Image (tube, rainbow, N blue to C red):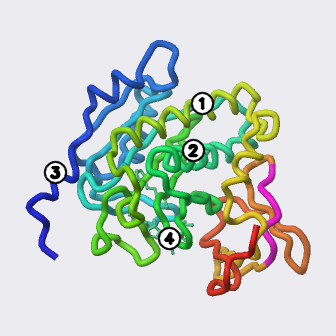
């Protein structure tokens, strides 16, 4: 379908100056916000800075990416200015064993910001997806570089149905959200991340004393469900997802006992049986 001549009116550019004024303050987590028109991957760009001048709280936003990265070597793609594609550089001073919660925390923050600003009821599919029903609205990619973590998020905002890159995707526009303005969405997401991040790091990364685990589970569409997990080497595990452990790993009770799965090991998680109705909560 040809681009609408009004497409740009739907998709105003993000203002680096306005975002910086709103979010970068003495004492705030966010130390800089850069908006670039085009790049390969914001995660790759921030990862490169770690070797020279790592600044915790640096945020890089791209209006379009030509080589957006997803989990396990997958790609992330969206038309220019149709979504939020950004990465953050963080250095959580919590034990390594608890750092798996960082990506979950970012998902939780984004879910609650999306519900507040766009009034869309999203759920969190472990490990890294914001879902509307069975469709993916946003994905999160956490990559460790030395002692820092680059966390990237792709959120589908104004994509029209014919622009969705995969069948299982959706966007705020497709879901008839009350707001598809990227500026208030990004501000709300970054503010929520900052507040959850402070609580979590002050608690030394403990998901319970920080309240993170309870909050995350309230948004989870995975825990409490029968799941079918695809593992590397065409292995499949089916069982009941019973929780998320102190490391952020998914706990699945299968016939042969309990398994704990890390995000890096899991190829896909699906509700099982995939076509069945949701289990009531
Ligand atoms: N704009 C986009 N919106 C949603 N998905 C996208 C987008 N661009 C690329 N993709 C990719 O499409 C795929 C979605 O397919 P699918 O739902 O089968 O994966 P998945 O099981 O959700 O995997 P994961 O749990 O890692 O996200 C993902 O690999 C995702 O990275
Ligand atoms: O669902 C996934 O597999 C994760 C997708 C993460 C995409 C975002 S877009 C901004 C940042 N830069 C990237 O190259 N990837 C992440």
Q: Which residue is under mark 1?
A: 195
Instruction: From the viewer's side, name the closer residue of 81 and 11.
Output: 11
Element carrying mark 4: strand
- The front one of 160 and 253 is 160
Query: Which residue does the image show at 81% across and 73% down from the upper left?
Result: 240
Image coords of residue 187 (percent x, y): 42, 35
Magenta span: 239-245
Instruction: State which mark lies toward you, 3 or 1.
Output: 3
- Residue 244 inside the magenta-drawn segment: yes
- Give the distance between the C-alpha atoms of the residues marked 2 and 4, in whole angstroms: 19 Å
Residue at point 28% right, 75% down? 162
Q: Which corner quadrant holds the N terminus?
A: bottom left
Query: Reading the chain from its start, which is encountered first: label 1 or label 4?
Result: 4
Find residue 280 and report its horizontal and vertical position in percent. Answer: 75, 72
> In the rendered image, which quarter contains the C terminus?
bottom right
Please say whether residue 258 is one of the residues in the magenta stretch: no
- Residue 93 screen position, x and y as percent: 67, 28
Going by the picture, which residue comes out furthest to the left? Answer: 5
- Give the image location of residue 177, x and y in percent: 40, 57
- Which residue is painted at 36% across and 30% down in the image? 33
Mark 3 or 1 closer to N-term? 3
Q: Which residue is mark 2?
A: 106
Circles 1 and 4: CB distance less than 8 Å? no
Label 3: which residue?
9
Q: Is residue 172 above or below residue 34?
A: below
Q: CA distance from mark 1 to mark 2?
A: 11 Å
Q: Residues within 10 Å of mark 1 (few under 14, many from 20)?
A: few
Question: What is the CA distance from the residue labelled 3 to the residue labelled 1?
Answer: 33 Å
Judged by its main secondary structure, the magenta piece is strand
The earlier-in-sequence mark between 1 and 2 is: 2
Label 3, residues with CA under 10 Å away: few <14, some 14-19, many ≥20: few
Q: CA distance from mark 4 to mark 3?
A: 26 Å
């Amino acid at each position: 379908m040809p681009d609408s001549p009004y497409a740009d009116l739907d998709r105003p550019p993000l203002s680096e100056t306005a975002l910086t004024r709103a979010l970068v303050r003495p004492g705030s987590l966010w130390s800089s916000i850069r908006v670039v028109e085009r790049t390969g991957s914001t995660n790759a760009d921030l990862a490169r800075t770690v070797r020279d001048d790592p600044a915790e709280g640096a945020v890089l936003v791209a209006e379009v990416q030509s080589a957006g990265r997803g989990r396990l070597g997958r790609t992330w793609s969206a038309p220019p200015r149709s979504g939020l594609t950004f990465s953050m550089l963080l250095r959580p001073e919590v034990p390594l064993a608890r750092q798996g919660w960082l990506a979950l925390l970012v998902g939780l923050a984004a879910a609650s910001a999306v519900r507040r600003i766009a009034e869309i009821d999203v759920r969190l599919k472990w490990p890294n997806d914001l879902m509307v029903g069975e469709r993916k609205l946003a994905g999160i990619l956490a990559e460790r570089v030395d002692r820092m973590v680059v966390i990237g998020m792709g959120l589908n905002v104004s994509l029209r149905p014919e622009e969705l890159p995969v069948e299982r995707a959706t966007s705020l526009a497709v879901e008839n959200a009350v707001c598809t303005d990227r500026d208030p969405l990004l501000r709300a997401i970054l503010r929520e991340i900052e507040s959850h991040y402070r609580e979590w790091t002050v608690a030394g990364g403990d998901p319970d004393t920080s309240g993170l685990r309870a909050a995350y589970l309230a948004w989870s569409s995975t825990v409490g469900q029968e799941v079918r997990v695809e593992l590397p080497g065409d292995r499949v595990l089916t069982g009941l997802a019973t929780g998320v452990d102190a490391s952020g790993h998914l706990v699945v009770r299968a016939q042969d006992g309990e398994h704990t799965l890390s995000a890096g090991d899991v190829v896909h998680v699906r509700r099982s049986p995939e076509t069945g109705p949701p289990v009531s909560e």
